[in-house]
Amino acid sequence: MTLSIIIPSWNTVALLRRCLLSLETHPAAATQEIIVVDNASADGSADMVASEFPSVRLIRNQMNNGYAGGNNQGAAAAQGEYLLLLGSDTEVHAGTMDALISFLNAHPEVGAAACRLEYPDGKLQPSVKRFPTLFNAVAMYMSLHRFNRYYLMSDFAHDQLRDVDQPDGTCFMLRRSFVEQHGLFDVSLSILYNDVDLCRRIKQTGYKIYFLPSVSVMHYGGSSTKQASAALRAEMYRNILLYYERYHGKLSRWLLLPILVLRLFGATRDLRAVKVLIQAQRIPA
C-alpha cells in the first residue's frame, strides 16, 4: 500500500460526503486506502460513510477523541507508506495526491509536504506560517494582527516551491516511517497547535517540510470548530497555553492566561468555561 488517507470527522456529514466523492473522482494513481475516523458525530456521518462508501475503512468512536486522537487512530490502522492527513471539509483535485507522493519519493530529505489551499471560489487560502513566538501569540490573541505579518508569511505569495516551517494540516502528507519512530500527534494538544508541534518535531529530526504550489485542494474551513461549545473552546485555549509553555517557558502561560480568559468570556459569556480554563492551570478560580 502506497498511500493511506486519514480523515477525522465530527458532525460534517454533507462536507464529508463531498470529500469522499472527490476522492472517488480523483484517486491517486498509486494504491491507496481511505480511513474515516468518526468522533461520535450526531449528524449521521458514520452511517452515511458505511452505506454510501463501503470501501472506506470506518472507525466509529463512542466519544469525541479530538483531532489529534482521531488522526492517531487512523495512523495506527493505516498500511500505507505515506499518510495523508486530510480535512473532512476539503475536496481534492486531480493529480494533487500523485504530486505529493512523487515529490516525497524524489526527495528523501523531506519528511512531509503540503499543497495550496483554495476557497470554494478558487481564491488562494493563505496556509503557510513561520513558527510562532510568544510575541506572536500575544499579538494574535489581542487581535493585533498587523504585528504578525512576518509570522503569517504575508510576504509569501504561495507561488514558490520551498522549505517552510508550518503548513496548514488540512492536506498534509508525511512518511509513515517518521510516525513509527516518533509518533504522530501529541494528544495532550487535542484540538489546537498539535500540527505546529508535529512540524517542530519533524524539523527537529532533521527532515524538511515542503510547500508545493503547483497542486491544490479546495478547503471550506472551520466546519467543526465553528460548532464548538463553551467547554470545547476552553479546551482549545488550554491547548494554546500548553503549547506556549512547552516551547517558550512557564512565564508564557501566565502572560497569556489573562488574555485568553478575557477572550474566552467575550466569545462565550460563560463563566463556567472560564473557571474550567483557570482550574486547568492548577490555580484557584
Image: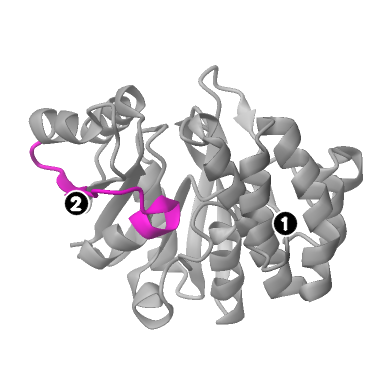
Q: Is residue 165 visible?
A: no
Residue 43 placement: quadrant: top left
Residue 285 is labelled as 1
Residue 142 placement: quadrant: top right
Kind of residue indicated by mark 1:
Ala
Which sits earlier in the primary sequence, circle 2 or circle 1? 2
Q: Is residue 141 visible?
A: yes
Residue matched to label 2: 33
Give the spatial CA distance, label 2 vs label 1: 48 Å
Numbered range of the magenta stretch: 54-70
- In the image, residue 24 sits, relative to residue 195, either above or below, namely above
Mark 1 surroundings: few (<14), some (14-19) or many (≥20) residues within 10 A:
few
Kind of residue indicated by mark 2:
Glu
Q: Position of residue 219 (x, y in %)?
A: 49, 31
Q: Position of residue 176 (x, y in %)?
A: 34, 70
Left or right, 138 with reference to 58: right
Mark 2 surroundings: few (<14), some (14-19) or many (≥20) residues within 10 A:
many
